[in-house]
Image (cartoon, helix red, strand yellow):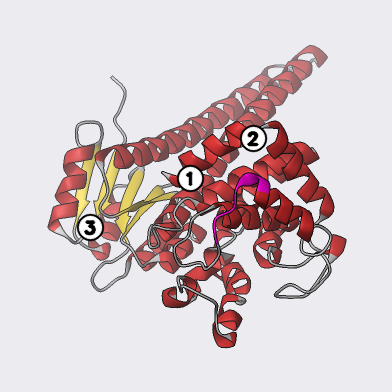
C-alpha cells in the first residue's frame, strides 16, 4: 500500500484547525499545531510533504514561519490561508515560495484540490530525485565494468534519457506553476470585484474581448497568455483608491480624477511581488494611454504604447459602453452604438487596427458575443 502524504496544519484557531483536519484526515496523514513556533519545531523532528499555514498567527507571524520553512526544507509545499484584506501579505507569501492560497471561509472542495495538487507536485519531485540517484549509481557501475565503445554509447543514451526525462518534468512543473499562478490571479480579481457587485465580471469580460482581438490579430500563444493575465489585472490599482471615489455617481471632481489616474501606477506597485513579466506590467501601466499621446500616466502614444495595452484599452472601453454600472452617468449602448463610438475614437484614443479587429469580430459573431456578455454579467 502506498504511503499517504504527510500534511501539517499550522492554525491557531480551533474551529478552522479542526475543520481542516476533518477534511484532510480521510486522505492524508495529518498533524496539527496551534502556533508557528510549534510548527517549526515539528518540522525539525519530522519533515512533511505539505503545510497549510494560517497567515495570522500569534507571536511569530505566518509570513515569518513561511520564510523559515523554506530555509529549512525548500521542497515542502506550503499553502497559505488568509482572510479578506490581506492582499499584500498573500503576494509576499507567493514571492517567498508558497504554492497557492486558500481564502477563509474555505470549503471542502477548494481545500482538497489545493492539497492534492501540492502533494502531487511534492511526490513528483521526490520521484525525480530518487530516479536521478539510481541512474547516477548505475552509470558509475557500468563505467567500472567496461571501457568499451559500445558501453560508452549506452552510457550516452542513458544520459540522454535522463536529460529528456528531466526536461519533461521541468515542463510539467512549469505548466502546473503557470496554472496555479493564473488560478490565483483569477481568484484574486474575483475577490476584489466582489467588493463592488456592479463591477463584478468586468475583468472577465475585458479578458474575453481582449482574447477576441488577439485571435484576429494573430498574436502568439505566449502573447495571448500575457494578455490574459494582464486583462484580468488591469484595474487592480483601484484597490488603492477610495471606494467612494471609484463608485461615485456622476462626474469626478478634478481632485477625484487625479486620484483615479493614479490607479495604473498603483497597480504595478501592488503586483510587484508576483514577478509578472515586463509585458504584463506594461499593460497594467499603459492601458489608459491615448493613441495620440494625451492619456495617462505617461502620455505616450502610437506604437510606443505596448500592443497588449492598446488591446486592453479597446476591450476595457467597449465593456464600459455596453455594461450597466449604476454609478456611471452615461447610458448603456447597444453593440452597434458602441462600435460606432469606437470608430469615432479610432486613431485618437485607440489604435485603429485594434478597433478594426474588434469591430470585425463583433460583426461576424454578434449573437455569440451578446450571449457571452450576458453570461459574464451573471457570474
Where is residue 186 drawn, in percent x and y?
Answer: 49, 49
| 362 relative position to 10: left or right | right
The answer to whether the residues at label 2 and label 3 have Cβ atoms under 8 Å apart is no
User: Is 279 contained in the magenta span?
Assistant: no
Residue at mark 1 to residue at mark 3: CA–CA distance:
24 Å
Whether residue 308 can be seen here: no
Residue bearing mark 3: 11
Q: Secondary structure at mark 2?
A: helix
Q: Is residue 349 depicted above or below 250 in this figure?
A: above
Whether residue 155 can be seen here: yes
Where is residue 288 drawn, in percent x and y?
Answer: 69, 66
Q: Residue furthest top?
A: 150
Q: Secondary structure at mark 1?
A: helix
Residue bearing mark 2: 366
Q: In which quadrant is the C terminus drawn?
A: top left
- Residue at the image point whose x is 35% and y is 63% from the top: 65
Give the magenta range.
Answer: 331-336
Residue bearing mark 1: 183
- Residue at the image point whose x is 31% and y is 50% from the top: 52
Neighbourhood count class around disc 3 (C-alpha, 10 Å): few under 14, some 14–19, many 20 upward:
many
Question: Which of the marked residues, 2 or 3, is nearer the chain's N terminus?
Answer: 3
Where is residue 132 drawn, in percent x and y?
Answer: 57, 31
Q: Quadrant of residue 360?
A: top right
Q: Is residue 72 depicted above or below 257 in this figure?
A: above
- Residue at the image point whose x is 23% and y is 57% from the top: 11
Residue at mark 2 to residue at mark 3: CA–CA distance:
51 Å
Amino acid at each position: 500500500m502506498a504511503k499517504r502524504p504527510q500534511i501539517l496544519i499550522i492554525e491557531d484557531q480551533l474551529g478552522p484547525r479542526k475543520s481542516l483536519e476533518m477534511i484532510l484526515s480521510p486522505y492524508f496523514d495529518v498533524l496539527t499545531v496551534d502556533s508557528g513556533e510549534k510548527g517549526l519545531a515539528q518540522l525539525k523532528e519530522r519533515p512533511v510533504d505539505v503545510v497549510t499555514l494560517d497567515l495570522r498567527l500569534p507571536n511569530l507571524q505566518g509570513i515569518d514561519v513561511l520564510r523559515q520553512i523554506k530555509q529549512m526544507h525548500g521542497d515542502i509545499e506550503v499553502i497559505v490561508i488568509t482572510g479578506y484584506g490581506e492582499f499584500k501579505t498573500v503576494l509576499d507569501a507567493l514571492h517567498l515560495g508558497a504554492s497557492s492560497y486558500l481564502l477563509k471561509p474555505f470549503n471542502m472542495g477548494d481545500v482538497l484540490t489545493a492539497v492534492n495538487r501540492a502533494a502531487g507536485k511534492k511526490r513528483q519531485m521526490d520521484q525525480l530525485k530518487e530516479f536521478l540517484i539510481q541512474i547516477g549509481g548505475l552509470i558509475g557501475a557500468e563505467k567500472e565494468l567496461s571501457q568499451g565503445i559500445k558501453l560508452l554509447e549506452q552510457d550516452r543514451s542513458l544520459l540522454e534519457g535522463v536529460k529528456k526525462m528531466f526536461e519533461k518534468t521541468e515542463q510539467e512543473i512549469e505548466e502546473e506553476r503557470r496554472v496555479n499562478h493564473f488560478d490565483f490571479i483569477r481568484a484574486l480579481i474575483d475577490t476584489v470585484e466582489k467588493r463592488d457587485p456592479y463591477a463584478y465580471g468586468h475583468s472577465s469580460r475585458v479578458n474575453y474581448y481582449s482574447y477576441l482581438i488577439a485571435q484576429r490579430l494573430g498574436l502568439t500563444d505566449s502573447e495571448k497568455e500575457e494578455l490574459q493575465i494582464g486583462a484580468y489585472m488591469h484595474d487592480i490599482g483601484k484597490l488603492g483608491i477610495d471606494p467612494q471615489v471609484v463608485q461615485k455617481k456622476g462626474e469626478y471632481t478634478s481632485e477625484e480624477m487625479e486620484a483615479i489616474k493614479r490607479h495604473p501606477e498603483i497597480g504595478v506597485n501592488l503586483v510587484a511581488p508576483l514577478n509578472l513579466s515586463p509585458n504584463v506590467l506594461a499593460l497594467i501601466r499603459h492601458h489608459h494611454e491615448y493613441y495620440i499621446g494625451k492619456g495617462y500616466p505617461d502620455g505616450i502614444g502610437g506604437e510606443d504604447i505596448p500592443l497588449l495595452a492598446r488591446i486592453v484599452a479597446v476591450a476595457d472601453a467597449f465593456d464600459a459602453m455596453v455594461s450597466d454600472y449604476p454609478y456611471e452617468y452615461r447610458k448603456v449602448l447597444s453593440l452597434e452604438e458602441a462600435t460606432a463610438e469606437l470608430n469615432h475614437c479610432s486613431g485618437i484614443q485607440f489604435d485603429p487596427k485594434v478597433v478594426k479587429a474588434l469591430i470585425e469580430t463583433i460583426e461576424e459573431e454578434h449573437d455569440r458575443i451578446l450571449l457571452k456578455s450576458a453570461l459574464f454579467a451573471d457570474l
